[in-house]
Image: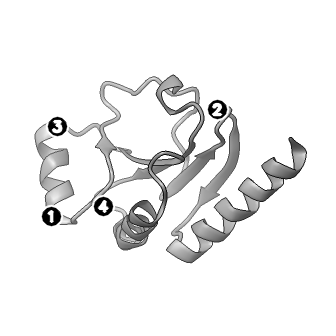
Amino acid sequence: MSDFKGKWLLLNFWAEWCAPCLKEIPELNRLYLSENKEKFALIGISYDPLNNSKIKQIVKQWDIQYPVMATEPMPILPYKLPKSLPGNYIINPDGELVAKLVGQQTHESLSKLLKSLRKKRQLSQ
């Protein structure tokens, strides 16, 4: 997590068998491509224990344009896997979990939330 200090981070937990997760991919691609990479990062985390070969296949098949990692071995995250999918966690530049979203998100919903969280953070500093 220290690699992302100073950036907003969106962790997207997904699974290949989760239809809303797959529908969310184009929205996440749009968000990822529209954000400043020096201030924002997005990582997709496979809910299922898939090997790298399978992950690469899924990334290609679904045209995932943001980094994706497997849960096996479990990434060193201070958060538990969500109980339902898709699950999105937003971490602020200080490394604090500031939002947990369950269910399919859109580029618009995520952009609005990020804008609101950024504004709230600026006001509190």
Dividing the picture into quarters, in which one does residue 30 lie? bottom left
Residue at x-position 38% and y-position 26%: 74
Check disc 2 and give the amino acid type. Answer: Gly
User: For the residues marked 2 and 4, what is the alpha-carbon distance in whole angstroms?
Assistant: 30 Å
The earlier-in-sequence mark between 1 and 3 is: 3
Dividing the picture into quarters, in which one does residue 51 lie? top left
Q: Residue furthest right?
A: 124
Residue depth check, mark 2 versus mark 3: number of the one nearer the observer: 2
Classify mark 4: helix, strand or loop.
loop
The image quadrant where one finds the C terminus is: top right
In this view, 47 is above or below 22: above
Residue at x-position 56% and y-position 34%: 80
* Residue 18 pos. (x, y %): 37, 63
Residue marked by disc 3: 52
Residue marked by disc 2: 95
User: For the residues marked 2 and 3, what is the alpha-carbon distance in whole angstroms?
Assistant: 27 Å
Residue marked by disc 4: 17
Residue depth check, mark 4 versus mark 3: number of the one nearer the observer: 3
Residue 47 in sight in this render: yes
Residue marked by disc 1: 61
The earlier-in-sequence mark between 4 and 1 is: 4
The earlier-in-sequence mark between 2 and 4 is: 4
Classify mark 1: helix, strand or loop.
helix
User: For the residues marked 1 and 2, what is the alpha-carbon distance in whole angstroms?
Assistant: 32 Å
The earlier-in-sequence mark between 1 and 2 is: 1
In contact (CB < 8 Å): disc 1 and disc 3: no
Q: Is residue 110 left or right of residue 29?
A: right
